[in-house]
């Protein structure tokens, strides 16, 4: 939508501008990745920003700027271009945009705070502030694993208003789960996790289309079947299962074959991280894993397995904090993939190290032409 087509263009409330001591304009808040600073040597840009308050159409905004600066040779086209540039940068919305008919009044109230967060983080020009929420309401998500990470991810997505969520898990609720799998209660002990999860999630938000099945993934064919045997069954695959150990490799293979965006998350002691991948855009999971193996210097003797440097136990040490953090990161990855907010280049893992505040986990690499999963022509094509 062009600025001229907007009924009442305004600077987003979260992006309200201010003038610096040297006369520049800072807009978009002080959050890194959102805010910007614009020089305003003649002063009329500040008038423009103040005039875009949602009470005027584009023509009236131009007239207001011209009225305040009568002595300046200021063509209308220059003012409109400045408005267009602000809109293209994601700082402008149409205050006159009609609420979407797909969201009822109660839904708009339910999601009103989430909408404003998405609007704050959104740097893409939109027809209206509710557009990302509508996209989320149409989304179909497949979630593998509803334990600590998966349960938290499911909770956050359902609360946020995802359209449909299908949960898959083979296990039942056990007492040892309850220290971290906060979706469940003692009354759920012995029940299949999918059944207990669906009960809790429906109580949280009955408007979401929730389904589930008690199924164990034993190979790529099982994953392929869950995804519907081809593209378009789901918009995103979320992997929160940690067994079998090769399940991430299988997910990478099947998502490459079906063109399905996907994300995986989990915790390893105090390290919590999420990986985000889109077939054909950036490196795949295998690219990233191989690059990370090459980067690390574990100083292993010949023949030693890398697990000796970080041994695996029959259980994964965790609590509600590490599980919930990883699940929330997974839900945020899904929102990024489904809504495009924030706009990021996929093919990365990021997270945090709870041992060292401020020490981030970040893995990135270029796509690898020799990658056995995505680098060989035809490798990702399923017959």
Image (cartoon, rainbow, N blue to C red):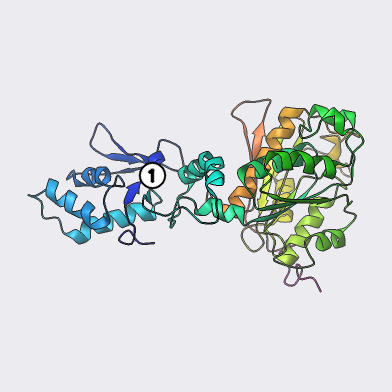
Q: Residue furthest bottom?
A: 383
Viewport quadrant of the C terminus:
bottom right
Residue at (23% x, 52% y) in the render = 61
**Span highlighted in magenta in the image:** 374-383
* Rendered view: 264 above or below 139: above
Residue at (75% x, 42% y) in the render = 150
Q: Residues within 10 Å of mark 1 (few under 14, many from 20)?
A: many
Q: Residue furthest left?
A: 71
* Rendered view: 298 above or below 372: above
Question: At which x and y percent is residue 302?
Answer: 87, 43
Residue 205 lies in quadrant: top right
Residue 197 lies in quadrant: top right
Residue at (85% x, 28% y) in the render = 186
Question: At which x and y percent is residue 8?
Answer: 31, 52
Of the pair 25 and 310, the residue shown nearer to us:
25
Q: Which residue is mark 1?
A: 12
Q: Is residue 144 left or right of residue 74?
A: right
Residue 381 part of the magenta-drawn span: yes
Question: At which x and y percent is residue 347?
Answer: 64, 53
Viewport quadrant of the N terminus:
bottom left
Q: Is residue 266 visible?
A: no
* Rendered view: 356 above or below 323: above
Q: Is residue 343 left or right of residue 212?
A: left
* Rendered view: 259 above or below 154: below
Q: Is residue 90 left or right of residue 281?
A: left
Residue at (76% x, 38% y) in the render = 200
Q: Residue furthest front?
A: 105
Question: At which x and y percent is residue 378?
Answer: 75, 72
């Amino acid at each position: 939508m062009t600025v001229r087509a907007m009924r009442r263009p305004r600077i987003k409330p979260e992006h309200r501008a201010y003038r610096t001591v040297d006369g520049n304009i800072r807009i978009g808040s002080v959050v890194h990745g959102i805010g910007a600073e614009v020089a305003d040597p003649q002063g009329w840009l500040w008038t423009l920003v103040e005039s875009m308050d949602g009470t005027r159409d584009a023509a009236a905004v131009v007239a207001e700027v011209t009225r305040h600066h009568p002595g300046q040779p200021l063509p209308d086209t220059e003012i409109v271009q400045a408005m267009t540039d602000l809109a293209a940068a994601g700082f402008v919305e149409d205050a006159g945009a009609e609420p979407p008919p797909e969201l009822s009044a109660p839904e708009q109230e339910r999601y009103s705070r989430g909408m404003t967060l998405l609007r704050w983080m959104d740097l893409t020009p939109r027809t209206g502030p509710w557009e990302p929420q509508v996209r989320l309401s149409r989304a179909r998500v497949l979630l593998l694993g509803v334990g600590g990470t998966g349960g938290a991810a499911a909770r956050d997505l359902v609360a946020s208003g995802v359209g449909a969520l299908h949960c898959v898990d083979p296990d039942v609720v056990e007492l040892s789960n309850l220290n971290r799998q906060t979706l469940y209660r003692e009354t759920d002990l012995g029940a299949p996790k999918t059944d207990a999860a669906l009960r809790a999630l429906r109580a949280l938000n009955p408007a979401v289309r929730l389904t589930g099945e008690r199924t164990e993934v034993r190979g790529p064919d099982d994953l392929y079947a869950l995804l519907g045997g081809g593209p378009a069954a789901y918009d995103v695959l979320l992997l929160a299962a940690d067994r079998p150990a090769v399940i991430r490799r299988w997910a990478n293979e099947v998502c490459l074959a079906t063109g399905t965006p996907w994300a995986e998350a989990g915790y390893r002691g105090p390290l919590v991280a999420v990986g985000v991948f889109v077939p054909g855009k950036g490196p795949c999971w295998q690219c990233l894993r191989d690059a990370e193996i090459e980067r690390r210097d574990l100083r292993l003797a010949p023949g030693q397995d890398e697990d000796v440097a970080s041994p695996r136990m029959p259980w994964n040490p965790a609590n509600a904090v590490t599980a919930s953090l990883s699940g929330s990161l997974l839900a945020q990855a899904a929102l990024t993939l489904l809504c495009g907010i924030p706009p990021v280049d996929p093919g990365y893992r990021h997270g945090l190290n709870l041992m060292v505040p401020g020490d981030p986990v970040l893995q990135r690499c270029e796509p690898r032409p020799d990658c056995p999963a995505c680098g060989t022509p035809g490798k990702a094509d399923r017959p």
